Amino acid sequence: MTTALSFWVFDADGFPARWHCGSGWSDEPYVGWMHVISDVVTWTAYLAIPVMLTLFVRKRNDVVFPKIFWLFCAFIVSCGTVHLIEAIIFWWPVYRLSAVIKVFTALVSFATAIAMIRILPVAVTLPGLAAVNKQLKREIQTRKETEAELAKMNQDLESFVSIASHDLQEPLRNIISYADLLKQDLGDNLSTDAHQDLAFITSATGRMQRLINDLLTFSRTSRHDATFCPTPLDECVNEALEILHQRIQDSNCTIERTPLPELAVDATLLVQLYQNLISNAIKFTDHENSVIQITAKQVDGVWVMSVCDNGIGIKEEFAEQIFSPFKRLHGMSEYEGTGIGLAICQKVVEHHDGRIWVTSQPGKGSQFHFTLTPDLSASTTDE
Ligand code: ADP
């Protein structure tokens, strides 16, 4: 059936080639050639347009009404084919094929027209490019204003924390010195209970002083005028280890290091970061064979720094919470601390457009990782 149909379609029997229809073509052949050439050129153009449209639709995934595009392409291709057959018929009288293609073109044209009528109400309501631009500009402006407001609020909050911490230190120092004076004045007359009470005062004030100092560091970390200079990170680690020298000796831990890269960072902040992570690694390792590994590796063009220990570890559900200020997983009687250290680490890393996270197996150790981007330009920010 299909073979018979295709045979019928391409069968030119009974029809003369157009050049042989009447004497007009032979008297004025240029008229025939005008037909042929224009039909072929039109066909070529009709073929190029859908190719362009297809490329356009494939490259942009935000095209509205993509189905209409395909229908439109079919419409143009079939119109083009009608022109091509019109030119061919001058030599090969495939009038039957021409009729079939014209029927097909008529159907596709009709379907395209119907589809266009259907989308018209929606299409006219679509915002024009100018309207979209205007809306976008409005949104950008609103976002800028919100960001400025947020920055101002942050600044106010930071200066409040800074001033409050500063002012709190004065009365605290007084409590500590008066408690000392009281101890000296009363000397041997102090009862055992009074001794104990004074010891509580000293320990509580000491803790408060540490808390205030940590809060000050936290607020200064965000106000710090970060200066990003090419810095060998090994130097930052050296400095952090130097600061922690006594604690490292006391804990008898082993430090294992691999060479670290040189990156555009704020050295002061990086020393603080390594100091906090190494200090925690020492603090949260209970046993004698404490090993702290300080390493770096490049993953997909980004440097990932790690400080790993074989200490008590952290349960997975706390892996994110521990970076919030004041979040501690243990009581003061177990491990000393204020819960600010990791919050400072997070701020430092965010200042460097990086990310910090922890992986851990409780009882086996923790691995703190942070990323640093190598192309962070050597510049100064005044956040
Ligand atoms: P701090 O050490 O003063 O308590 P941090 O902000 O440095 O405060 O740490 C928050 C909490 O995260 C700690 O109290 C501890 O429970 C947990 N933590 C931090 N580092 C480690 C580590 N290396 N191993 C196990 N737990 C850790």
Image (tube, helix red, strand yellow):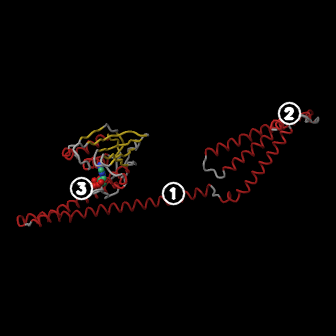
Residue 341 visible at all = no
Badge 2 amino acid: Trp
Position of 192 with respect to 30 (left or right) is left
Q: Earlier in the sequence, mark 2 or mark 3?
A: 2
Q: CA distance from mark 2 to mark 3?
A: 98 Å
**Where does the image place residue 6, in percent across and percent down from the top left?**
82, 36
Q: Residues within 10 Å of mark 3 (few under 14, many from 20)?
A: few
Q: Quadrant of the N terminus?
A: top right
**Where does the image place residue 100, in percent across and percent down from the top left?**
83, 42
Q: CA distance from mark 1 to mark 3?
A: 50 Å
Q: Nearer the viewer, mark 1 or mark 3?
A: 3
Element carrying mark 1: helix
Q: Earlier in the sequence, mark 1 or mark 3?
A: 1
Q: Nearer the viewer, mark 1 or mark 2?
A: 2
Res 92 label: 2
Q: Which residue is mark 3?
A: 334
Label 2 near label 1: C-beta < 8 Å? no
Label 3 near label 1: C-beta < 8 Å? no
Position of 94 with respect to 171 (left or right) is right
Position of 126 with respect to 145 (left or right) is right
